[in-house]
Amino acid sequence: MTGRRSDLGYWLAAQRGPLAAAALFAAMFALFVAKHPAGLSGSVVNTAANKGVLLALVAMAQTLPVLTSGLDLSVGSVFVMTNCLASTTLAGTPVQIGLGIAAVLGAGIACGAINGLVVVVGRLQPIIATLATGAIYQGIALWLRPAPGGDVHEGFADFMTSSLHDAVPVSLLILIATVVVIWLPYRRTALGRAAYAIGSSEQAAYMSGVPVARAKFATYVLAGLFAAVAGLLLTCVTESGEANALLAGSYTLSSIAAVVLGGTALYGGAGGVIGTIFGAFVLRTIGDLLFVFDMDALSQPLFLGVVLLVSVSLGSLRLLRVKRRLDLYR
């Protein structure tokens, strides 16, 4: 009995970040629905889900490098670049649309692979390497789409941003499928476990025979894939593409905040995408609350900036009190 209690206590300690983020999101969303003129309607839920899933996918992309003690500053640029690419490929027959989806996802994987090669083979600091590659991806986005526009199959876009039976948003199902099909299997693989080991101590992981190079490379590849899925969804939401550098920067910074809010440690080795997803929805709900409470539009960026700063600072503050990594679970 004592062993079961000990296991439960360990699990609760390890999951307190995601649980806190989930509870905060539930409270905030309930307040949003109560204040919204339409209440808990299908359209309100669908709109909130579409916005939240976009950030959640980009934040999931950020989570993987963070687990290895890195930061990927290119996730927003990959997100925007794949949006521009998708705006030229999601048209025509179902076969053409399928090939277009494959091309967009392949482009995201390629961008992640380039990031991984620069970090692993070039041995550059991830924050510097991805800052440089992010600028390249932004340039490609501008080349693909010099001006906003695109040719997107309207039926496909409507389906991807609609709700099944006016109750379950398709975007939310896509997010769940991404977690079940990609994240959970990856988390249980040797490379997934290696990512956590690298974040805890790269030197100790290397001395223990952990495939450090392959594990790091895999995190950036999957990050590119997640960002590409977000780019696809953005294309369906807007039915166009735009090489928006401000959007790329905003999503990159918000993804870092969502990672921290979800309980993933910026120094690596602890956390996961489940908490990140709730952290992303918390950030998106903050914006919705500011809207329904009719806050001045000019003050909204200031308020969101303060929230981002506080969330990142809280993650760093806890690190200052930790002497050993095991103390995180006590």
Image (tube, rainbow, N blue to C red):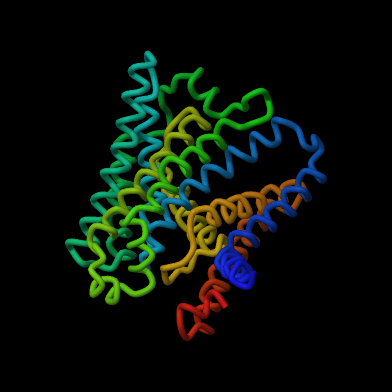
Q: Is residue 299 above or below residue 147?
A: below
Residue 93 at x, y = what percent? 37, 13
- The answer to which of 184 and 2 lies nearer the viewer is 2
> In the image, what residue occupies the spot 23% across and 75% down?
207
Instruction: Determine which quarter of the picture holds residue 201.
Output: bottom left
In the foreground, 9 or 35: 9
Q: Is residue 206 left or right of residue 60?
A: left
**Looking at this rendering, what residue extends furthest in the top direction?**
93
The quadrant where residue 159 appears: top right
Say left or right for 201 vs 312.
Answer: left
On the rendered structure, is 62 left or right of 34?
A: left
Write the residue at 38% across / 40% down: 228
Quick one: which residue is furthest to the front in this view?
1
| Viewer-proximal residue among 155 and 24 | 24
Q: Would residue 132 be seen by someone viewing this image from the given angle?
A: yes
Residue 22 x/y as whole percent: 65, 55
Q: Is residue 297 left or right of residue 17?
A: right
| Image vertical order of residue 267 relative to residue 116, above or below | below
> Which x, y percent locates residue 321?
53, 84
Count of numbered tags: 0
Question: Which residue lies at the image location 29% right of the left edge and 42% below the top edge?
Answer: 140
The percent coordinates of residue 306 (x first, y second) are 61, 66
At a point 25% along the width and 49% down the height, the residue shown is 113
Q: Is residue 309 visible?
A: no
